[in-house]
Image (cartoon, rainbow, N blue to C red):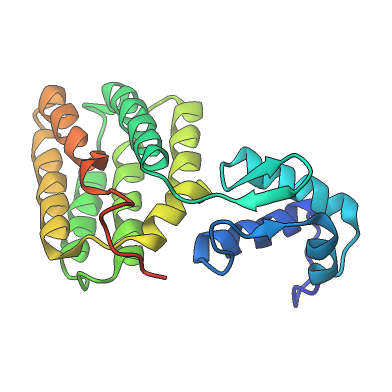
Amino acid sequence: MATGVHDARPLAVRVHEQIASEIVSGALKPGTALVQEQVAAQYGVSRTPVRDALALVAMEGLATLVPGSGYVVNNLTAQDVYNVFEVRYHLEQLAMAQAIGRHSPAQLVRLRALIDEFETLEPTDAEEQFRLGKEFHLRLIDPCPNQYLRETLGSIWGHPIQRRITRVYQLGPEHQASIAQAHRDILEALPAGDLETIIRVLGHCHDAGDINPQDLPSRE
């Protein structure tokens, strides 16, 4: 499995990363069979790291083990979307309850700059909108003293299912403007310590109601 540079990580981790990336990008379509022997031959590795990698892919919800048939790439469902948004919202509420009143002037300036940059993006650039939105929300909870909570939220934002949602769907200029305004509302509530308003607006930021895999166009 050539990488171009030396990678000291376990082979199973590298194979998992490659498979997950191909599912997220759409190179591996929903319904594609992931047979150990074929995957091993494709990447030039033995079956053992492939077996472990496919188990990780399944744990992440990207594939399902079908007895007698091997693993099959999952479709992205509405339930996947709602589950990710629900967990993000409730954990961010908890983090904000601990972070409120702790933001420095420099942190507030950085949050405002992220909003300004977000508004300049092309409405069709869903991946860059996601990147800046993710950075805004993670910097928003920087003052939270609970390191495990911050790290957990970071892992959710980086989860392959979240990346897959972002890669598959674009929501257009109205959604972009709506999220930018929500971020400004949060920023304005921070100096006053208005946690109630922040939590209400976070509900809009993490609302999966306008992301329905059955209704929105695919970007593949």
- Nearer-the-camera pick, 13 or 198: 13
- Nearer-the-camera pick, 111 or 22: 22
Residue 157, position as x, y percentages in the image:
43, 45
168 in relation to 73, above or below: below
- Nearer-the-camera pick, 109 or 20: 20
150 in relation to 116, above or below: above
- The image quarter in which residue 144 lies: top left
Image position of 134 (left or right of 30) = left
- The image quarter in which residue 39 lies: bottom right
Q: Residue furthest bottom?
A: 4
Quadrant of the frame with the C terminus: bottom left
Image position of 187 (left or right of 98) = left
User: Is residue 158 something that shows in the picture?
Assistant: no
Residue at horizontal 29 percent and vertical 40 percent from the top? 140
Residue at horizontal 74 percent and vertical 52 percent from the top? 13
Residue at horizontal 21 percent and vertical 62 percent from the top? 118
Residue 23, position as x, y percentages in the image:
57, 60
Residue 211, position as x, y percentages in the image:
27, 49
Residue at horizontal 51 percent and vertical 27 percent from the top? 148
- Nearer-the-camera pick, 39 or 129: 39
